[in-house]
Image (cartoon, rainbow, N blue to C red):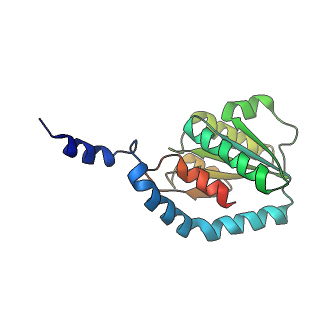
Amino acid sequence: MPDLDTLVEEAKKSELFTTPQLADDMRRFLDQHRPAALALAAEARERGIKTVFFTGSGGSWSAMYSGKYFADRFTTLTTDAQLSYELIWRNPQRLGPDSLVFAASYSGETEDTVAALRFAKEAGAWTVGLANKPDSTIATEADTAIAYESSALYAMSMAAVSLF
């Protein structure tokens, strides 16, 4: 029977046990993506973005909701955080060419988030995909992609939004 220390060390390697990797992953992410995120914010100003939507499902949506709090606190933009299918079902009138939609999916393949991304693009919105896999559907179909290779599941998508 393995001892507890061995089991804990194995658990630390799991994607579900992210605390030990979070600080290193966050530091690496911020170092790697800060210039791109600042460029993204500058482009949003140039495009005249008026509304920012944050969407995802499950834990990814939870991280996006934090993005809404950041944007509400530090910008004058109109923001909304909606579950992916809710964005489609509500079909907000503000969703259009002067909108930015952050769509987050850890796998980059979450069906409802892919559908919301496509819906936003059809409405003319500028889309930013946040995914752990750079070759995923979310990352390849979004106008702009931020891939975060991290075992710290949902914290990286929140970090990407907070940089914006």
User: In percent of the image, x 87 and y 42: which residue is there?
Assistant: 94
Image-quadrant location for residue 82: top right
The reply to whether residue 140 is in sight is: no
User: In percent of the image, x 84 and y 56: which residue is there?
Assistant: 49
Q: Residue 92: where, in percent of width, then height?
A: 84, 36
Q: Residue 75: where, in percent of width, then height?
A: 81, 56
Question: What number of labels is visible?
Answer: 0
Q: Is residue 98 left or right of residue 104?
A: right
Quarter the C terminus occupies: bottom right
Quarter the N terminus occupies: top left
User: In percent of the image, x 72 and y 47: which residue is there?
Assistant: 69
Q: Residue furthest left?
A: 1
Q: Residue 161: where, in percent of width, then height?
A: 66, 54
The one nearer the camera, 144 or 6, is 6
The one nearer the camera, 8 or 134, is 8
The reply to whether residue 19 is in sight is: yes
Please determine whether, in this image, residue 28 is positioned above or below residue 155: below
Please determine whether, in this image, residue 77 is positioned above or below residue 38: above
User: In percent of the image, x 63 and y 71: which residue is there?
Assistant: 35
Q: Residue 9: where, in percent of width, then height?
A: 26, 48
Q: Residue furthest top?
A: 89
Q: Is residue 107 left or right of residue 78?
A: left
Image-quadrant location for residue 111: top right
Q: Is residue 15 left or right of residue 56?
A: left
Q: Is residue 90 left or right of residue 129?
A: right
